Amino acid sequence: MHPTEKAAISARVIGLISGTSVDGIDAALVDISGTDLDLKIELLAGETYSYPAELRERILAVGAGLAVSMAELAEIDDAIALVFAQAAQNIQMGYQPATLIGSHGQTVYHRPPGDSGLGYSLQLGRGALIAHLTGITTVSNFRVADMAIGGHGAPLVPRVDAYLLSHPQEGRCIQNIGGIGNLAYIPPRRDNWLEKICAWDTGPGNSLLDLAVVNLTAGAKTYDENGNWAASGTPCYPLVEQWLSQDYFHLPPPKSTGRELFGVAYLHQCLQDAQPYQLSPADVLATLTELTAASIVHSYRTFLQQMPQQVLLCGGGSRNLYLKQRLESLLTSVPVITTDEVGLSADFKEAIAFAVLAYWRERGIPGNLPVATGAPKEVLLGELYQSHCV
């Protein structure tokens, strides 16, 4: 395709995602043009829509391993699709309507590939129903094609990061901190730079912190705003060292994880480990925050061939000022900023990424990055559901 033809490609797309923290549905209305190095996005609107409280509790319970019948699972699947469709309709009010939706859905189970064979990942909120309810063509189930050929199906956004956030001279780590933390190392944009990108899940992001806040407040709070509570405590470094011996942190990439590992059972083990130290609630949160920060930095120092010249934070954890401060301290001379500061919304970057992945899928452009997911080749990501509205 001639470059001038590539530049003419454009679309208005809605990206939808709810992460492992189940905080709510992030919706982004985006104008997209170009395809790869000429990829450009304009965020027209971004909003987070809360789940109904009862539905959120059901999602968290299923994600934590609660056994449910197929009928109950189908009911939850439908309920998630309904609120995702409503989010898509709300985000475009007052704008020319979108022609495409990219919906990541809600992950409730993720099993990385291992000795037992292929991995498996389940995202609820079926795209066919979203397409029907909104009247907009919808792409969903982004992870399954990569996993079907042996990849982890995660992380899926490094290819988008590469085209939107690379720098001609600087190596950058794009560090997303959702329920789970994941990084994409993007080398300077020269020579065979795309082949040098690497990405993987670093471990817990906000998952243990949020679960601990719920535990410590008997459900009165669901998160530690700005990390203020943790900042009033003192980390227990022997505990952090003990927790960092967990096998996952020492597995070489590509690798992925989720609440199946860093969830309720893991938190309970952490709290049990902490008992001999007689920590205050603030100390517990400070120590869990230190684990997130230390596991990210450990990942960089262990598995990157060279440290980045800049770290760009995104996701909900980028708003945790204490966590950001601890990362800056542990990384010493590496600047830590948010993607906001380079022109890409830190709050809605993941939703934007799934809008781009849907845009690529509709145009027949592969979305995975094999060096990141461990897949043997590039594949089209997502299942496309046409709207049948007349």
Image (cartoon, helix red, strand yellow):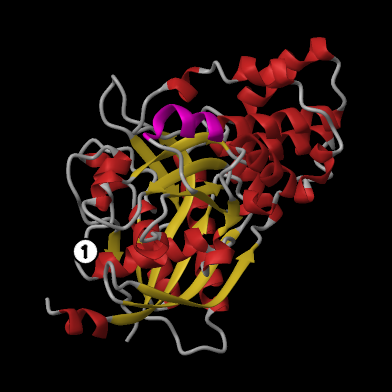
Residue at mark 1? 365
- Tell me the amino acid under the disc marked 1: Ile
- The answer, for residue 238, to whether it is visible in the render is yes
In the rendering, at what x and y percent does residue 251 appear? Answer: 40, 23
The stretch in magenta equals 296-305
Q: Which residue is drawn at 12% across and 76% down?
A: 1
Quarter occupied by residue 389? bottom left
Left or right, 247 with respect to 383, comes to right
Q: Percent x, y for residue 238?
A: 70, 15
Q: Is residue 4 left or right of residue 83?
A: left
Of the pair 390 and 27, the residue shown nearer to us: 27
The kind of secondary structure the magenta stretch mainly shows is: helix
Along the viewing direction, whichever of 160 and 112 lies nearer the viewer: 160
Residue reaching furthest to the left: 1
Q: Element at badge 1?
A: loop
* Magenta-span inclusion, residue 301: yes
Looking at this view, name the residue that lies furthest to the top.
276
On screen, residue 234 above or below 18:
above
Q: Position of residue 365 (x, y in %)?
A: 21, 63
Comparing 151 with 34, the one in front is 34
Residue 256, placed above or below residue 339: above
